Amino acid sequence: MAEIAVIFNPGAAWGQARKIKPTLLAELKKHRITFDFFESQSEAHLLELARHVGSTYQYVLCAGGDTTFHLVLNEVMPVSRRPILGLLGVGSSNDIARQLGFLNLESLGSALQKKVSREVDVGAIFVFGELRRYFLGQVSLGLGVTVNRFVEKWLKRFPFLRGWSPFIGGWGILSSYFHRQVPFSLSLEENERIIQTTPVLVVISNTNYWASGQQINPLGQVDDGKLEAFVFRPKHLAQLAKLYQAMREGRHLQAQEVTYLQGNSFRLFSSHPLALQLDGERLFDSKQEEVREIKIKVIPRAIKILTCKNR
């Protein structure tokens, strides 16, 4: 058995990731890396593979998108001796790999040879004290949920439109306002300070990038034992567009319509059910389970990530 397991998700980026498989295998062999290769056939199979390799191998390289990393993380976190994760971004957003992983094969091959790793924080979702989910990147509420739901619905029906995802996302924002899904009422508690607000978007972040490269969290560090919360309250669509533009360079923190908080835990509660989007997975987004209060905590330096340098 090899020291390194490679989990390849060909379904990432709406199936476009499968094109990179021959190049990935060739690059690993070029660097004379010994590995066992596992290709997922479905989400259920991906979870099964993650459980198997997570308890068997010292290194687990995930080739996929943010959702792939998220699903694998949630399978390996319960393992007593967690593997070191390597993240190769071949998905549609790649926000996690942009900071914690690799976006090109050359740097990945070099890192696998040197085997340099760093410890990073992991976020955790609790409902009435019960741990429900882990995350590496962000938790979103409001537009972060409704727009992703809208885009996913349209691309499932019309997959040939995937090149138009940003435009469909814009349409999803308009739909969210039109159907009065935003703004929504929310109370947010951090260190006994409670903020009652009606935002259109809330993001609680562990990493820097969100929504395909937006610098949602320019000041955050992935190993500082802290999470950052951003509450967006634009009065109209023009303000929202301006905030989104500023976010590209991390300039949104100065805006009056944005509240910024930092802490090791946050409690969110509302009189209405809360739906979450965390690293590509939607949680509590159905009438089967209605949740009105959640707690989000950081687990400091909970897992090791393969890296090519200190970032």
Image: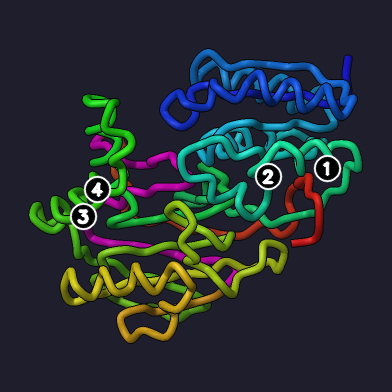
- In the picture as drawn, the residue positioned furthest to the left comes out as 178
Circle 3: is it few (<14), some (14-19), or many (20+) Cα within 10 Å? many
Give whichever of discs 3 and 2 has the lower sequence position. Answer: 2
Residue 146 showing in the rendered view: no
Q: Is residue 99 above or below residue 81?
A: below
Asked if marks 1 and 2 touch (Cβ < 8 Å), the reply is yes
Label ID, residue 173: 3
Give whichever of discs 1 and 4 has the lower sequence position. Answer: 1
Label ID, residue 167: 4
Residue 22 showing in the rendered view: yes
- Horizontal side of 48 relative to 34 (left or right) equals left
Give whichever of discs 4 and 2 has the lower sequence position. Answer: 2
Determine the CA span between mark 1 and mark 2: 9 Å
Instruction: Tell me residue 3's x, y (percent).
Output: 88, 25
| Circle 1 residue | 111
- Image quarter of residue 226: bottom right
Q: Secondary structure at mark 1?
A: helix
Residue 72 magenta-drawn? no
Q: Is residue 3 above or below residue 93?
A: above
For the N terminus, give its image quadrant.
Answer: top right
Q: Amino acid at mark 1?
A: Ala
Q: Residue at x 56, y 63 (%)?
A: 208
Q: Secondary structure at mark 3?
A: helix
Q: Secondary structure at mark 4?
A: helix
Q: Which residues are magenta?
A: 263-287
Q: Amino acid at mark 3?
A: Ile
Q: Amino acid at mark 2?
A: Phe
Q: Amino acid at mark 4?
A: Phe
Of circles 4 and 3, which is in front? 4
Determine the CA span between mark 3 and mark 2: 30 Å
| Circle 2 residue | 102
